[in-house]
Image (cartoon, helix red, strand yellow):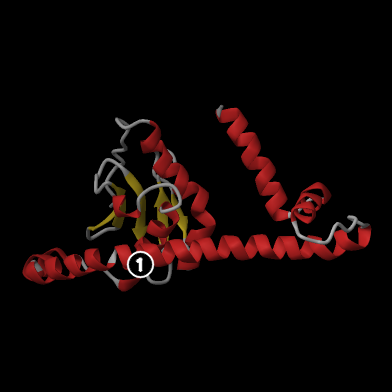
Amino acid sequence: MLKCAHAIRTVLLSELAAPSEDFVRMIFKKMDCGGGFFTEKIKDKLTPLVKSAIETIINDKVKANLDTALKSTQKTQEEISEQQQTDASEEDHDGVVTTQEEIDACNIVRAIAAEIIDPHRVAMRDVKSYCSILLDDNNRRPICRLYFNNADRKMISIFDTPQEEKTTLADLPELFRMKERIHNAIRRYLADPEAGSSPAQAE
């Protein structure tokens, strides 16, 4: 089944990237075109329109997921703010500061995760060295870690494998291009409920 699912995914990704004549023909047949014939001229006209429509649908879905995630995290952000105020003296001692950029990054990861799980299952924990984004608020189920302390060189670790490996992050929108890795990190835990990572603490 996994092999078939992978093959289906490969075909769909290929069609989404560059719609084939058969795919465009199928769209044409399902359209109300008054029984016209699928000609070369119609193919040339429809192909870019199909590709554009697909891209619009994907972008709309990403935006909808992000909007949902932002709404779902509003209460969480308020709770984080309240907790930060309550523990202000302790945080000052530890030097832990949760930045808006870390919160925005968490919201993007939550929006990406919303395609396969309930976004409420994605939680954020901040420590001095990094900010963790966790599944089910479980330290043994890290989805990724944000290393944003250096403003000139932001780094991220995505736990799609048990071993932590840092990657440079140019800007927050780049997280969307890491969608598949983020999904794979989550799927590691969904496939095996007992699975968990215990990566070494950062320096």
Q: Residue furthest front?
A: 34
Q: Residue furthest right?
A: 40
Sort mark 1 into few (<14), some (14-19) or many (20+) by Cα contacts within 10 Å. Answer: many
Q: How many marks?
A: 1
Tag 1 residue? 70
Depth check, front residue: 82 or 128 = 82
Q: Nearer the viewer, residue 56 or 162?
A: 56
The N terminus: image quadrant? top right
Q: Residue at x 71, y 48 (%)?
A: 14
Q: Is residue 139 visible?
A: yes
* Residue type, label 1: Leu
Query: Would residue 148 be visible to someone looking at this image?
Result: no
Q: In the rendering, at what x and y percent does residue 148 appear?
A: 35, 65
Mark 1 residue element: helix
The image shows residue 102 at horizontal and vertical percentages of 33, 66
In the rendered image, residue 68, in percent from the top left (x then y), is placed at: 38, 63
Report the side of 163 relative to 136 (left or right): right
